[in-house]
Image: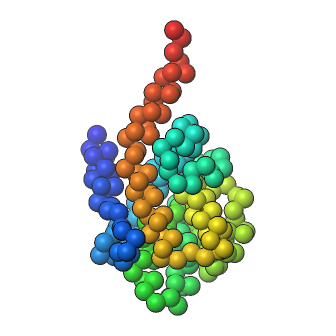
């Protein structure tokens, strides 16, 4: 019980960022590689339940674009825009570690993707098995002509917060559907 309470407390620390508000360390949870892996797994699971169980009924952006995927032990935090590439962008150090810019991948994949730009990442890996959050980041990047910037990170961050805010509803409906499958009446 204590674990669920502490994870909820961590999730509740995240706050939405308005479109006209700067995306920086001071107004968001920007933990980078220190972001708890359970949070990424929860995000992927919520997206999966929303897409494949509820058929996108909660209107979470981009869930209709998700392809099925297998949950795997992904153990490395990936910055979608490589940290080395971000060094050349003014102000990027303020948002590079934002939750909306991160996803989980394997350590091996993270090493292979280390210095690649977002276009190369998307074109090379978009048809591979990857978690829902990463699929959505790749979809957004491709839809924006292989650009990924502070605006995209802010929007994706706020979409993730919306998904997390609806977690109780998404998960309770999932349990309701599961029990309906066993209803023999």
Q: Position of residue 49 (x, y in %)?
A: 52, 41
Q: Nearer the viewer, residue 93 or 38?
A: 93
From this view, report whether residue 106 is shown above or below residue 170. below
Asked where in the image residue 132 lies, by quadrant, the reply is: bottom right
Q: Position of residue 127 (x, y in %)?
A: 72, 59
> What is the basis of the colouring in this image?
rainbow
Asked where in the image residue 125 lies, by quadrant, the reply is: bottom right
Q: Nearer the viewer, residue 21 or 120?
A: 21
Camera sees residue 18 = yes
Q: Which corner quadrant holds the N terminus?
A: top left
Q: Position of residue 79 (x, y in %)?
A: 52, 72
Seen from this angle, which residue lies furthest front?
Answer: 20
Q: Nearer the viewer, residue 10 or 183?
A: 183
* Residue positioned 66% across, 74% down in the render: 145
* Residue positioned 46% across, 66% down in the render: 155
From this view, report whether residue 137 is shown above or below residue 61. below
* Residue positioned 50% across, 28% down in the render: 177
Count all numbered tags in the image, as a single digit: 0
* Residue positioned 52% across, 40% down in the render: 57
Camera sees residue 49 = no
From this view, report whether residue 90 is shown above or below residue 9. below
Q: Position of residue 101 (x, y in %)?
A: 49, 69
Q: Is residue 28 left or right of residue 123?
A: left
């Amino acid at each position: 019980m204590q674990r669920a309470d502490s994870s909820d407390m961590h999730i509740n620390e995240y706050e939405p960022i308005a479109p006209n508000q700067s995306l920086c360390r001071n107004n968001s949870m920007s933990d980078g590689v220190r972001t708890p892996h359970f949070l990424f797994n929860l995000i992927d699971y919520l997206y999966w339940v929303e897409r494949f169980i509820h058929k996108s009924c909660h209107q979470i952006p981009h869930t209709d674009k998700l392809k099925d995927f297998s949950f795997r032990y992904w153990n490395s935090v990936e910055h979608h825009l490589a940290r080395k590439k971000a060094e050349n962008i003014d102000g990027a150090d303020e948002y590079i570690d934002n939750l909306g810019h991160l996803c989980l991948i394997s350590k091996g994949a993270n090493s292979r993707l280390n210095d690649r730009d977002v276009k190369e990442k998307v074109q090379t890996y978009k048809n591979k098995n990857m978690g829902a959050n990463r699929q959505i980041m790749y979809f957004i990047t491709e839809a924006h002509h292989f650009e990924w910037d502070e605006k995209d990170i802010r929007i994706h961050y706020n979409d993730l917060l919306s998904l997390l805010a609806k977690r109780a509803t998404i998960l309770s409906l999932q349990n309701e559907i599961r029990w309906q499958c066993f209803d023999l009446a």
